[in-house]
Amino acid sequence: MSSLAILILTKNEEDNIVDVVRNAKTCTDEVVIIDSGSTDRTVELAEQEGAKVAFRAWDGDFSAQRNFALSQTEADWVLYVDADERITPALGAAIRDIVQHGALDTQYSVKRKSVAFGVTFNHGVLNPDHVLRMFPRNSVTWVHKVHEHPECPLPKQNLPGYFEHYAYTDWHEWEEKLCLYTTIWAQDAYARGKRTSLGAIFGHSLGGFFKMFVLRKGFLDGLMGTYMCCNHFFYTMLKYLKLYELQRQGDKK
């Protein structure tokens, strides 16, 4: 039988931490929290629930946090779970079966269904997606600061069941994440040599709205789905405006 560690990145997740640790412990006794400097009771509550807590200062690099997490366990398998995600019973059963009987020769993808503002989304911006999250520990490395993704040479399979992803508790949280993610994206894109123009910014923004509203059928989620598609227009515009600002500042040097 193999071993499994569930890895969770946190910063000020006081409202989520007890539930996510208890939920993770339905699959394994080894739950590892990688905290980036919480100022609330996240660390205290995690330790009370029996989780191991390690600290890595936040430097704007999500991949670095996830790679650091790999160094905090000796388990054969690792499963990444975000603090606002919950393992459903069918998914938990599949995970336990792999740990007990599976060979260390596959990486696994998990379906994720988003719940926000009292709505379960099935289309548009928050449509269900699949995320690669379960790996043999020695076979994975994460890349890119934001919108990070794993690099793993093993074949992929989808697990049955899904994560419930509680994306936003309120609009204030949505705004905070908007500011954080657009800034990190712009800085990373600029460092990689990406450039834009005012015309391109509008084109990208309009294209983003069309993709979410029409191609991903965001309108089928009703008024809230439509609002989220409009918000995606603004999100796309803001991240490219921040990139444009960085390149203007760079041109002046």
Image (cartoon, helix red, strand yellow):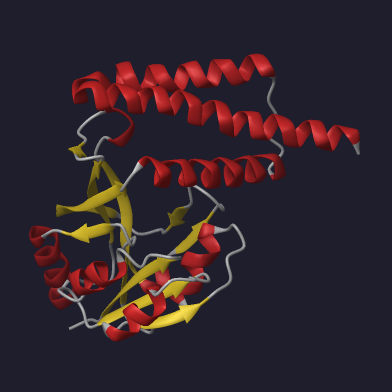
Residue 211 is drawn in which quadrant? top left
Residue at 49% over, 68% down: 67
Q: Position of residue 204 (x, y in %)?
A: 53, 21
Residue at 34% over, 84% down: 47
Q: Position of residue 189 (x, y in %)?
A: 64, 40
Height in image: 13 above or below 28?
above
Q: Is residue 72 visible?
A: no
Q: Quadrant of the N terminus?
A: bottom left
Front residue of 25 and 151: 25
Front residue of 118 and 35: 118
Height in image: 231 above or below 167?
above
Question: In the displayed image of the protein, which residue is found farthest to the right?
Answer: 253
Judged left or right of residue 92, residue 2 is: right
Q: Position of residue 237 (x, y in %)?
A: 55, 26
Height in image: 202 above or below 78?
above
Q: Is residue 138 visible?
A: yes
Q: How many marks?
A: 0
Judged left or right of residue 111, residue 232 is: right
Height in image: 73 above or below 97?
below
Q: Quadrant of the C terminus?
A: top right
Q: Position of residue 245 (x, y in %)?
A: 73, 32
Residue at 38% over, 40% down: 171
Residue at 36% over, 68% down: 8
Front residue of 23 and 130: 23
Judged left or right of residue 168, residue 219 is: left
